[in-house]
Image (spheres, rainbow, N blue to C red):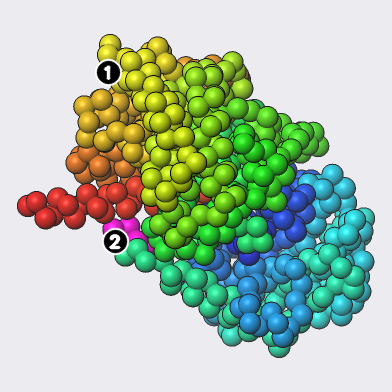
Amino acid sequence: MAAKLSDHALIGNARAAALVSREGAIDWCCLPEFDSPAIFAALLDNEKGGHFAITPSAAHSATQRYLPDTNVAEILFETTKGTARLVDAFTAMPEADKLHALFPDHEILRVVEGLSGTVPFNMEFAPRIFYGRELPQLNDQKKLGIHVTWKENIYVFLSSLAPEQLRINRQEARVTAAFSVGPGEQVFFSFSYSDQSPAILPELRTTAGKRLEQTINYWKNWISHCRYSGLYADHVRRSALALKLLTHAPSGAIVAAPTTSLPEKLGGERNWDYRYCWLRDASFTIRVLVKLGFEEEAHAYMNWILHATQLTRPKLQVVYSVFGHASLKERTLGWLQGYSNARPVRIGNKADGQFQLDVYGEVLDALFAYASLVKVFDHDTRKFALGLGETICKLWDEPDNGIWEVRSALVQHTHSKVMAWVGLDRLIKLAEKYCWKEAPLDKFRQVAAAIRTEVERLGYNNLLGSYTRELSGSTLDASLLTFSLVGYCDAASPRMIATARQVYTCLSKNNLIYRYKNTDDGLQGSEESFGICSFWLAENFARAGELQKAVQIFETMLAHAGPTGLLSEEVDPDTHELLGNYPQGFTHIGLVHAALSINEAYHKQALEV
């Protein structure tokens, strides 16, 4: 059985990522891109998936953390023989140094260091081709490492161990070694990727330590630009570091998560591929980047949105690849058992064919938040924004799949209507601010007013005492909590206070919030509580002045993070196990917004005392 998600740290280089378990196994890694086929996928099948494990052979305990202010993971092993640590990182190099050095496209550097006594270790390197579908051929090139090739991809395993210490089992495509480290002794392992032959090989014995130091300094320098220092600052900084790992630096895109098919419920079919970019996340993401001071990432992300949507304009697709590809064909990998037997394992995502009205509002709200960083928008951006406004005017009264991408019939989702209003509201403000004379403001204002009238007339149920999932409906949905967060209404307004309380009463368990209950979403079974929904509720309570409730909800979610501070998409309220793809950017974005709102409410209350 795979290790718990909470027992994994994420390492990466803003292009690819890997999950390292507390026991020293890389259980998940796709190279060269986030959505490339996995070469280590033990998380989805311990037997067939492949892994790269370094673990003490003596009885031991293990604790995992990140080195402070970095995305460099460290495991401290305390054994009956002594103490040692394992440090894992994708190497990172300053841009100036890249001009004077040859380096592989990706390198995972693993350093075993003795701290006390003499600690024996076992190492096992077991790569697999295309998510474990095939065993690779291991090509031992002695001092040049053990090479694995597949199509144009070259993967190289290197070690500072003596060659005779490595045992190669070609039939099982497995390399093993047994070694020991004493105080101050270090053993280096490198797993690198190149797409050209001959592959560039990283040197280990004299320069690996420097690369690790450069990587640590890279992350410390990056997070030093975070300008938040209020309540829960450590959690906010960790969330920012996690979001940076989900960023695809060459394009500026931000993937929802680096994994696929980690189940929303153990043993269920709700297993999706999240290694893509959802426009749904655009608004909250841009606002986080701007508020925390990461302007470079905000520029890159907005540029990606403008680039990725070119092929589908003026309509928007729900999800795109990091390179802006609009087709994400979904298929299943039948040979994989799935995480805790949750099948099927899927790659690709059918959401690429859905209609979600809310994404127009998300993108225009993101553009509005981004406007604080630019003096003027160019002609293409202005044309793009106005085109989205025209599309909203045409489609706002159409039923859609909604923010949660349900696979049942299309519905008149109240949240989608509100986001359509948000889109026009932001567009009107942008047009007024930048004097866009070609903007049909009267038309936008009339449609925005019509949407608001419709939402207030049909989207609120007086008997239920809440806004509702769909127009003229009688059920709840946690997406209603966003109405106050996107400026549609005040969190302290009677209707929003009532809605937040109803969501808490009807959609919570042990202070964790479900997206919805008893709703036909086109799938079998149910799911667990949804991380960002808890943060949305905490933010509503904070903005409404109910600070104690906000802190209770917020800290309940924090308590479910693993030792490395990472959170997944969902949480089982009974077992408290993290579920769904991991770590999930949307959840960490919610954490940051909620922390900032609680901090603001706390200081406001302090001034009033």
Range of the magenta residues? 230-236
Q: CA distance from mark 1 to mark 2?
A: 35 Å
Identify the residue at the far bottom of this view. 206
Look at the numbered discs 1 and 2 and tell me whether their residues touch, using CB distance below 8 Å: no
**Residue at which label 1 appears:** 465
Q: Which residue is mark 2?
A: 230
Place of residue 299 in the rendered image (x, y in percent of width and height, measured from the top left): 53, 59
Towards the viewer: 388 or 325: 388
Q: Position of residue 163 (x, y in %)?
A: 85, 78
Query: Along the horizontal axis of the image, is 599 left or right of 249?
Result: left
Residue located at (55% from left, 55% from top): 378
The crowding category of the residue bearing disc 1, from other C-alpha atoms within 10 Å (few below 14, some 14 to 19, many at least 20), is some
Q: Residue flagged by tag 1: what amino acid is it?
A: Gly
Residue extending farthest left = 609
Q: Earlier in the sequence, mark 1 or mark 2?
A: 2
Q: Which mark is residue 417?
A: none
Numbered disc total:
2
- Asked if one can make out residue 340 in the rendered structure from this viewpoint, the answer is no
- Say which residue appears at 67% left-offset and 44% top-offset: 310
Residue 89 position in % (x across, y down): 62, 68
- Specify the quadrant of the image occupied by residue 237: bottom left
Per the image, label 2 sits on a secondary structure element best described as loop
In magenta stretch: residue 235: yes
